[in-house]
Image (tube, rainbow, N blue to C red):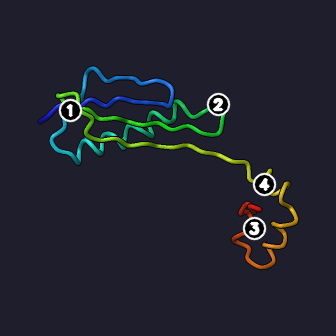
Amino acid sequence: MARYYFDIHDGQKLVRDDIGTECRDPDVVRAEAMTALPAIARDVIPKDGDRQALTVLVRNTRNMTVFTATLTFASIWLERCAIVLQRPCQRRLKSDPLLALSPIVT
């Protein structure tokens, strides 16, 4: 088995994995990275903004990045859209209820 290092970047700082994890093949590397992102995200969801991206950068023993994965958190208040776009949203509601919440770009 080969050793891989799972570094985490949160958009501002990079936390390097100095210990690493033994993985038998690329599928295990991918699974480890994909499992790590949601676990880390639970602790770092933004408290002062509406966007956060977490990236795991996987390095091999030669210090080469061999895999990356990113998990993005984005939020928007739909009620603010509905208040600002009340009339256009009402017109859309009559024609297509699924488009009622879609922002109208003019």
Quadrant showing the C terminus: bottom right
In this figure, which residue is indicated by the disc labeled 1? 60
The residue located at (51%, 38%) in the rendering is 53
Using residue 66 as the reference point, say whether residue 100 is left or right of it: right
Sequence-earlier tag: 3 or 1? 1
Query: In 3D space, how far apart are the residues under numbered discs 1 and 4 (Cα atoms)?
Result: 46 Å
User: Which residue type does callout 2 highlight?
Assistant: Lys
User: Which residue type does callout 1 highlight?
Assistant: Asn
Quadrant showing the N terminus: top left
Is label 2 in contact with label 3 (beta carbons under 8 Å)? Answer: no
Sequence-earlier tag: 1 or 4? 1
* Label disc, if present, on residue 4 of the rendered structure: none
Using residue 28 as the reference point, say whether residue 50 is left or right of it: right
Observer-nearest of 64 and 41:
64
Q: Splitting the image into 4 quarters, where does residue 2 fall?
A: top left
In this figure, which residue is indicated by the disc labeled 4? 81
Sequence-earlier tag: 2 or 3? 2
- Residue 85: percent from the left, percent from the top? 83, 59
In this figure, which residue is indicated by the disc labeled 3? 100
Observer-nearest of 61 and 46:
61
User: Which residue type does callout 4 highlight?
Assistant: Cys
Query: In 3D space, how far apart are the residues under numbered discs 4 and 2 (Cα atoms)?
Result: 21 Å
* Label disc, if present, on residue 47 of the rendered structure: 2
**SS of the residue under disc 1:** loop
Is label 4 in contact with label 2 (beta carbons under 8 Å)? Answer: no
